[in-house]
Amino acid sequence: MIHLETFRIALASLRAHPLRTFLTLLGVIIGVTTVVTVVSIIAGLNAYIEDKVLTLGGDAFVVSRFGIIRGREEFIEAFKRPDLTRRDMSAIEKLCNECVYVGGDLAASRGIRYEDQRLPDTQVHGATANINEVQSLELEAGRFYSDTEEAGARPVAVIGSDVKAELFGELDPIGRIVKIDGYPYKIVGILEKKGSILGQNQDKVVYVPLSTWEKNFGSRRTIEIIVKARGKERLSAAQEQVRQIVRARRHTPYAERDPFGFVTADALDTLWRGISAGAFALMTFISSISLAVGGIVIMNIMLVSVAERTQEIGVRRAVGARSRTIQIQFLMEAVIMAAAGGVIGVLIGAGVARLVEAVSPLPVAIRPQTVLAAIGLATLVGIASGVFPSIKASRLQPTEALRSE
């Protein structure tokens, strides 16, 4: 009961000066808003990367001319490498006994037309028939083209859901003919909707046989060779075999680097987490400064409040209030202010995060542990800021406090 009455008195004191209380909280509000916004965006991106970007799985990898580029020097070196070709892909398929599937993929933006409807800048992939096995492409309707159709360079296509919606509307596209840069293709399948990845539409896409793509658009492009190992535990063995095969075909000396790069789900995940960790560390530093400033402001205002309310403290001590009760009252005021700032900061941060999600391709995940951690951090700032002023208030002697003006 004593603590409840103390809480009521502390709350009444803060409500007596609402503008001063709000201005005192600004530092805490800004710090918590920054923390909640950044953590929510990074958490959303992490979940999005794991769910949609890292579609290779733990047992697959990509052999490409560039691999994962981490800097200017790596890009210049990769730019000098020779293209990967169908012959490289065929050699890997023939000689790699640790590989279950070996597929090829290349892509470019092309215009697509159906009757009087035209869809420009559509990502058209030329891929082997087993690409759906390696990348787990799910179909909404129809089928994927077969090995026979790929080997015979048949003009067939599998389209994304956005291509279907924009070119055909309510019509069933299966069996209809579209023209890709003037070349006719018969639609045999429709991919399930996948959404966007960081602003890149994954449904405005068309897959055609790799041989057909090369026949119509030329073969002077590097191919990404997609390999699926016999299992996650055999991934390293499969990579080593592929490395030896491609290096032998390139006549690469022992001491020189690989003239190609590997891309794996783990490598992408590691790269992304390094980037997100750096961004999180930077924003944590910035928000920590805001919280520290907010804590200093709270301590300063509490010290001012102790000086202003010296007579009040003296009266309460004279009628029997213990020094510990006075200390708890002023500590409560600091904690209530900081916790209130934390709640306001969480609400504003969540709103900012949702606004970012609405106006940009960045996904957001506002998790309960983020909210609780932010409010808890603000409360700790309040405790740290209120300790010294509350001790100072509790040590005032009743006679000296009553004598002051």
Image (cartoon, rainbow, N blue to C red):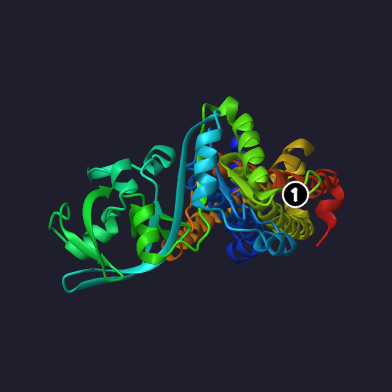
Residue depicted at 63% across the width and 46% down the height = 249
Q: Nearer the viewer, residue 113 or 217?
A: 217
Q: Residues within 10 Å of mark 1 (few under 14, many from 20)?
A: few
Residue depicted at 54% across the width and 41% down the height = 91
Residue 224 shown left or right of residue 164 in the figure:
right
76 vs 94: above or below: below
**x and y, in percent, of residue 298 in the image:** 72, 56
Q: How many marks?
A: 1
Q: Is residue 145 visible?
A: no
| Quadrant, the C terminus | bottom right
Q: Nearer the viewer, residue 82 or 7?
A: 82
**x and y, in percent, of residue 222 in the image:** 53, 58
Find residue 308 and report its image quarter. Answer: bottom right
Which element type, helix, strand or loop, lies under badge 1? loop
Residue 369 shown left or right of residue 104 in the figure:
right
Residue 99 shown left or right of residue 70 in the figure:
left
Q: Which residue is mark 1?
A: 257
Q: Is residue 126 visible?
A: yes
Residue most extreme to the left: 171
**x and y, in percent, of residue 221 in the image:** 50, 61
| Quadrant, the N terminus | top right
Mark 1 residue type: Arg
23 vs 36: above or below: below
**x and y, in percent, of residue 66 in the image:** 62, 56
Q: Nearer the viewer, residue 19 or 317?
A: 19
Q: Nearer the viewer, residue 233 or 54?
A: 233
